[in-house]
């Protein structure tokens, strides 16, 4: 009993600090833009895919995610829907925003919800802040999401573990926070002649 109480006393400040830090960071985030690199590994650690591009976020509920290499794909959230444009297939997929985002990094950065509403949070590194988030929703696409910051409290990237035990690493460069953005970034008009698939 004493050990259990001691454990609660030790862990509780850590939990409160972690939730407070993330809620404060996200609450002060109006816009976010960066270049990104994404790497996906299977459960054996084999690299499956490497991609890069640019991303833009405006809270609440708007973002633009542009894959440039090795293929071209555009994902735009306009506040209500998510538009996914595959340039090679000339195909647009339209999804309801809540269903499309799930509990993902895009959801975390663009949503106005407190992080502890949807995740259990714990701090896993102290010198350079890192936090592990476990979705409360059992239907979430990811088992765990780790968020990493540098010593200046600038967002470095995410690590994700999905339900197939694949790991994704997303790292950011040339980060700009709370800069004014062109609202056209969050408007998508399907190219003439493209196939449009609605998944709502």
Image (cartoon, rainbow, N blue to C red):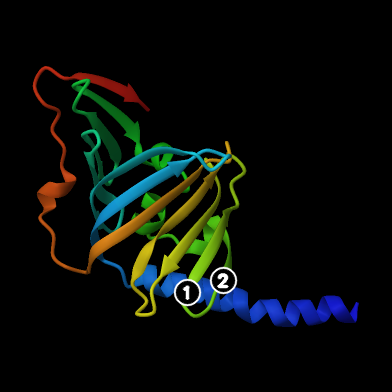
Position in image of residue 180 (x %, y %) = 13, 65
Position in image of residue 36 (x %, y %) = 28, 53
Image point (55%, 62%), residue name: 132
Please tell me whether residue 73 is drawn above or below residue 30 in the rendered image.
Answer: above
Q: Name the residue under label 1.
A: 129
- Front one among 100 and 87: 87
The single residue placed furthest to the right in the displayed view is 1
- Front one among 139 and 80: 139
Secondary structure beneath dot 2 equals strand
Image point (57%, 69%), residue name: 124
Image point (26%, 50%), residue name: 63
Position in image of residue 92 (x %, y %) = 24, 26
Quarter holding residue 93: top left
Q: Is residue 188 left or right of residue 46?
A: left
Q: Is the C-beta separation of discs 2 and 1 under 8 Å? A: yes
User: Quick one: quadrant of the N terminus?
Assistant: bottom right
Please tell me whether residue 148 is drawn above or below residue 4 in the rendered image.
Answer: above
Quarter holding residue 176: bottom left
Q: Residue 123 carries which label?
A: 2
User: Quick one: quadrant of the C terminus?
Assistant: top left
Asked whether the viewer can see residue 104, the reply is: no
Badge 1: residue crowd in 10 Å (few <14, some 14–19, many ≥20): many
Q: How many marks?
A: 2
Image point (29%, 38%), residue name: 81
- Front one among 198 and 40: 40
Q: In this view, does 148 lie to the left or right of 195?
A: right
Please tell me whether residue 141 is drawn above or below residue 26 in the rendered image.
Answer: above
């Amino acid at each position: 009993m004493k050990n259990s109480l001691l454990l609660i006393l030790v862990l509780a400040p850590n939990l409160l600090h972690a939730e407070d830090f993330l809620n404060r960071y996200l609450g002060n985030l109006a816009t976010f833009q960066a270049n990104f690199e994404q790497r996906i590994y299977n459960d054996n650690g084999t690299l499956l895919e490497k991609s890069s591009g640019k991303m833009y976020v405006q809270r609440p509920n708007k973002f633009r995610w542009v894959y440039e290499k090795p293929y071209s794909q555009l994902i735009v959230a306009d506040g209500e829907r998510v538009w996914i444009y595959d340039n090679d297939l000339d195909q647009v997929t339209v999804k309801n925003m809540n269903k499309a985002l799930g509990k993902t990094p895009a959801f975390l950065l663009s949503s106005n919800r407190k992080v502890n509403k949807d995740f259990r949070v714990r701090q896993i590194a102290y010198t350079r802040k890192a936090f592990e988030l476990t979705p409360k929703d059992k239907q979430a696409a990811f088992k765990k999401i780790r968020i990493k910051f540098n010593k200046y409290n600038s967002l470095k990237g995410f690590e994700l573990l999905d339900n197939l035990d694949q790991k994704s690493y997303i790292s950011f460069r040339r980060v700009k926070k709370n800069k004014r953005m062109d609202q056209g970034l969050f408007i998508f008009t399907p190219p003439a002649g493209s196939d449009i698939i609605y998944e709502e």
